[in-house]
């Protein structure tokens, strides 16, 4: 592993592990949830909010930033860290997921993907090489390979084609990444390229994808893609166990696009170290509050006079100061502070859930703690909300 | 003056004064700009943002809070300070301006105003007495009388009718306020009722309004209403001088709904101590940036690669961290953080402009400083926007 990157597992309990992932912009205590700053801002939040809640690593998106404001613009302004005033570790997703889900009129061949921008319809081409150049311009600490993403319910033939193509694209990403790094003057912090393990819900494909990735380089860490895309939760958990068995124990595993509070705990139980998801901010903007007793929707009239904080056990900047009644008032009145407070609370909820899991791992109580946490989260009668 | 409220003028220079206004929730160093939290939130900002920029007193609106969430709801939740987590001084506007500008189908008579809510069309009645009860429920430190507000260009007859009615309503407000305060158990911090001086652009009416208000009570402070509502700036400045001559020097004067940076400096030069205006947040949400060299609009393409802060002399939370290019990107991408950063910057701009004026008053350089400030602000070639 590169000298700029380290991963140490401090303590394990079953498949679960407490570790520390070192990057050029500082360490990440794992397991950890990364808030998503798609367009170089975690929606409705300030970087100071993220620091104050103990977030260490955040995510941005190569596809979105390439289209707006342009990765060349960000490079000229000193890179993503300076641009968005976040001096901690950043990971950029490659845009594979976006190209295959947001863009229209796409044509895929071995060379890459031709598509039209979802913003202005302009014609664009992403190849493994061009995506590496975009992620190099952005300058995140961890960059993801460009992969071929397919729908969650794809059959084994389609899943195999996409997974094998992703493996071939990994080799091309690695070559271009090496070429770019060789041209580097050394003053710029190094980046680490992560492969993305695909293979849908097909165990054999997942094992083959891990084997192929491991055979093609000494990777700093691994992404696990193509999950939480419509398959049953039990299928996701089963695949995570298969992948956990196949991946090297001394490298961090990042489960892409996951998730909900319960998914994080289930993921940690199956060996995952890093997570990201837009759920806490997107659902927060919709009025949904994560609590230890399940979700609630702050817009409901029952909270009109409720003096309690959003979650009684929470010490986030929203819960320390404001009542449910006040946050409900902000939502009913379309006030921007409401979007901010729920985004703050929900991201804090996931960040602190992962610190709590880490403490339980370190003190040897993780198995019992995680079972109790899941039982409480699932048992309560609060009405789930969008 | 009540023991809970004090006003001391530390230093004067011509009509301008540096003072300190003491309230049950702490002091306000004057001259001061109060950010407007219409619905119990200064739009797009967090109370912590306001504290960090040195804001001491903020404003909320009785009309809006009566309709949503209801002043009874806020009272039940412990009052406005606790509801919005602002432990500094608060002033509530009476809703006179809103009833006469936002509400539809209003009927005005000596008793009060019957109108329909701008939200749901429901029929409501505001009288001097009912408005006092609303402001008492909200519990702000300073509450404004209910007054009869008329368009800025009204002729002398209409302006006289409205001003004389406002004087009669002041007496009714005072009686109801006394009744409410008598029923108080002493545990609740006291409030101060301010008269509103009306009279349009008619000097004689303004002098008569001040004389009538002074003759009817020993007021803690005075509001100056009906300015910056369409009249020429020179007319506003002339009326301010007339009112300054007529008002007692040892009481704070609050120029309602003003203003723009230049209006604040011109107002201080004419004896004003307190200001409020939605301009910094409203214009901020529209992309307009206050700078020492005039306004700029951050959405313009010339800022696409501009690494400079919004205003080079500014030390606000936006300017210390972010480039114009980044803030422009946020606006172009409709990101919420953009609204927050410009609101933060613009409110900070006015708050620190008033501290700067105060420092100049204290050290005896105000006249020269204010002339230079106005010359620079007006001289530059930046294109005004929105």
Image (cartoon, coloured by chain):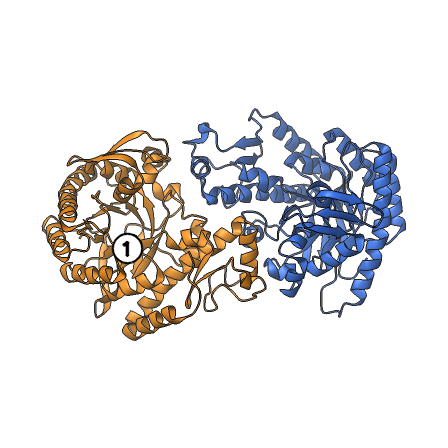
Chain colours: A blue, B orange
Of residues B142 and B267, the one nearer the viewer is B267
Q: Is residue B258 visible?
A: yes
Among the 4 quarters of the image, the one containing residue B71: top left
Helix, strand, or loop for circle 1?
Answer: loop
Q: Position of residue A343 (x, y in %)?
A: 55, 43
Q: Position of residue B92 (x, y in %)?
A: 29, 45
Quarter of the picture holding the N terminus of chain A: bottom right
Going by the image, does B177 lie left or right of A301?
A: left
Quarter of the picture holding the C terminus of chain A: top right
Please determine whether, in this image, residue B206 is positioned above or below residue B94: below
Among the 4 quarters of the image, the one containing residue B109: top left
| Residue drawn at 26 percent across, 57 percent down | B21
Q: Position of residue B354 (x, y in %)?
A: 34, 63
Going by the image, does A221 lie left or right of A265?
A: right
| Residue drawn at 21 percent across, 44 percent down | B147
Of residues B374 and A277, the one nearer the viewer is B374
Going by the image, does A283 lie left or right of B62?
A: right
Q: Which residue is mark 1?
A: B228
Please determine whether, in this image, residue B314 is positioned above or below residue A121: below
Going by the image, does B217 lie left or right of B100?
A: left
Would you call the spot at circle 1 few (<14 residues within 10 Å), some (14-19), or many (20 or more)?
some
């Amino acid at each position: 592993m590169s000298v700029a990157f380290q991963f140490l597992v401090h303590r394990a309990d079953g498949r679960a592990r407490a570790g520390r992932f070192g990057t050029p912009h500082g360490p990440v205590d794992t397991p950890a949830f990364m808030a998503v700053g798609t367009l170089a801002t975690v929606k409705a939040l300030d970087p100071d909010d993220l620091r104050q809640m103990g977030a260490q690593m955040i995510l941005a998106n190569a596809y979105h930033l390439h289209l707006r404001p342009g990765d060349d613009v960000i490079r000229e302004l000193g890179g993503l860290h300076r641009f968005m005033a976040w001096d901690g570790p950043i990971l950029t997703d490659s845009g594979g997921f976006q190209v295959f889900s947001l863009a229209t009129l796409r044509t895929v061949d071995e060379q890459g993907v031709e598509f039209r921008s979802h913003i202005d319809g302009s014609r664009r081409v992403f190849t493994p090489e061009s995506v590496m150049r975009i992620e190099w311009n952005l300058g995140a600490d961890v960059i993801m390979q460009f992969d071929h993403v397919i729908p969650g319910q794809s059959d084994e033939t389609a899943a195999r084609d996409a997974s094998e193509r992703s493996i071939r694209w990994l080799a091309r990403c690695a070559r271009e990444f090496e070429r770019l790094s060789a041209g580097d003057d050394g003053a710029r912090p190094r980046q680490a390229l992560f492969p993305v393990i695909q293979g849908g819900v097909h165990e054999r494909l997942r094992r083959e994808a891990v084997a192929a990735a491991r055979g093609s380089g000494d990777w700093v860490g691994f992404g696990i893609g193509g999950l939480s895309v419509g398959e049953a939760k039990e299928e996701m958990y089963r695949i995570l166990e298969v992948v956990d068995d196949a991946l090297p124990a001394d490298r961090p595993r990042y489960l892409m696009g996951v998730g909900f509070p319960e998914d994080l705990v289930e993921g940690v139980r199956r060996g995952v170290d890093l997570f990201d998801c837009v759920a806490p901010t997107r659902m927060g903007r919709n009025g949904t509050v994560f609590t230890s007793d399940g979700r609630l929707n702050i817009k409901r009239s029952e909270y009109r006079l409720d003096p309690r904080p959003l979650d009684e056990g929470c010490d986030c900047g929203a819960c320390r100061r404001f009542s449910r009644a006040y946050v409900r008032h902000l939502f009913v009145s379309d006030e921007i502070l409401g979007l901010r407070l729920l985004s703050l609370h929900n991201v804090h909820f996931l960040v602190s859930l992962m610190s709590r899991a880490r403490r339980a791992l370190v003190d040897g109580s993780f198995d019992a703690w995680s079972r109790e946490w899941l039982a409480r989260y699932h048992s309560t009668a609060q009405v789930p909300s969008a």
